[in-house]
Amino acid sequence: MPADVFADLVGQDEAVQTLRRAAAAAGELLAAGDGDPPPSAGAMTHAWIFTGPPGSGRSVAARALAAALQCLHGQGCGRCAGCHTTRAGTHADVRFVVPDGLSISVGEMRALVLRAASTPSAGRWQVLVIEDADRLTEAAGNALLKAIEEPPPRTVFLLCTPSTHPDDISVTIRSRCRVISLRQPPAEAVAQVLAERDGVPAETAIWAAAAAQGHVGRARRLAQDQQARERRDAVLAVPRRLTTVGACFDAASSLIAAAEAEAEAAVAETDAAERTALQTALGAGGTGRGAASAARGTAGQIKELERRQKSRATRAQRDALDRALVDLAGFYRDVLVSVLRAPVAPVHTDITGLTGAAAEKWTAESVLRRLEAVLSCREAITGNVKPRIAVEAMMLSLWRG
């Protein structure tokens, strides 16, 4: 783990400078106490929103600022107890909200806001980091808004959303926060991180960085996980399979099945551990008088756990499917670049022969329609259209061109 807490933010120099100034100003504010605020006080505020495309490092930036605020030296050194415990997720005054399911409930948010309003017990600030703040329900957003409007002293709210569009975060919350806009990091910067920090061979790092389209986490998985590479290969084989209507439905079924299998594998271990822990806490296996009635009383709690796990599995499936759609969009983007002979580097550098062959058969207009079909499928799934329906419609559009 890099020493400097901001070192994991790849290709975000301007944002890092802003966050460093904020951390330094926060330290000066604490040192000033009830006296006159220091000249740099304006660099720090109590509520922040981190936006940017997937893989740009929204949650990384929020966690880095949280660590810098708790840094005993005030600069995010990465070596002190404040930095170390925050980055490890064990700091007593830092709460991370990482939704397992499709939304963050009002009950959960009220409890977190109440906890964040208390005086820091061990650190310098109370920090509430909300990853995927776009998943706040309306009621949860209202609960958070009230806290941001009347902020407790020494409490900081860090929110991560794809954008500041009203569909992602309410206008009123947005108006009370400082926005840090992150950009998609260049492939060269991602490749350098993979090579220097993860020991990935340079050639593999360059390929993975391009294929991941600037997403650091996905690039790391492609470089190190053979199964991730196999799933990508299966997705990129889809265009060649679309020869008939039947083939379109078969391809859609295969894509959905692969996403379901990936999601099931991702959550299976966590689900089993949670169920075992709950059953143990509820006295599973007990005998004697009252054991039967006690078991009946636990049914509601087990049902609630199953509901949460189902929601988490749905989200994991949609995330897996979205990764596949991003790869597919990258293929049609490369074909369009080839048709137009644009001086742009390809995303999928290992299948240039396939994209070149497709470019010889398709017009720019038909390629653009196919690309739009993939992007429309992503939007439809985000809008809660059944994934199978959205993917089947996409496959037919890709076949027709």
Image (cartoon, rainbow, N blue to C red):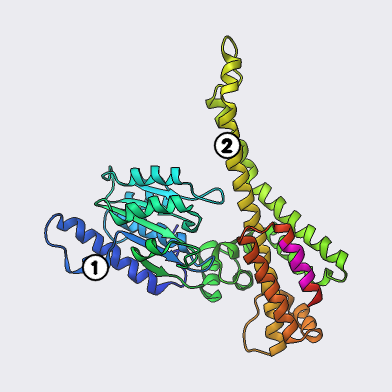
In the image, 166: left or right of 280? left
In the image, 176: left or right of 235? left
Query: Which residue is found at the position 56% from the left and 71% from the top?
Result: 214
Query: Which residue is found at the position 51% from the left and 55% from the top?
Result: 135
Residue 395 belongs to magenta span: yes
The answer to which of 273 and 367 lies nearer the viewer is: 367
In percent of width and height, residue 229 lies at 70, 62
Residue 331 belongs to magenta span: no
In percent of width and height, residue 258 lies at 74, 55
Task: Please tell me how crowded label 2 is: few (under 14), some (14-19), or many (20+) other residues with Cα within 10 Å.
Answer: some
Labels 1, 2: front one: 2
Q: Which residue is mark 2?
A: 305
Q: Earlier in the sequence, mark 1 or mark 2?
A: 1
Quadrant assignment for the N terminus: bottom left
Query: Which residue is found at the position 88% from the left and 69% from the top?
Result: 244
In percent of width and height, residue 160 lies at 45, 60
How many marks the image carries: the answer is 2
State whether residue 280 is above or below residue 32. above
The three-letter amino acid code for the residue at tag 2 is Leu
Query: Which residue is found at the position 67% from the left and 84% from the top?
Result: 337
Q: Which residue is mark 1?
A: 42
The three-letter amino acid code for the residue at tag 1 is Gly
Q: Which residues are magenta?
A: 390-397
Instruction: Name the quadrant containing residue 224.
Output: bottom right
**Circle 1: element type:** helix
Residue 79 seen in the figure: no
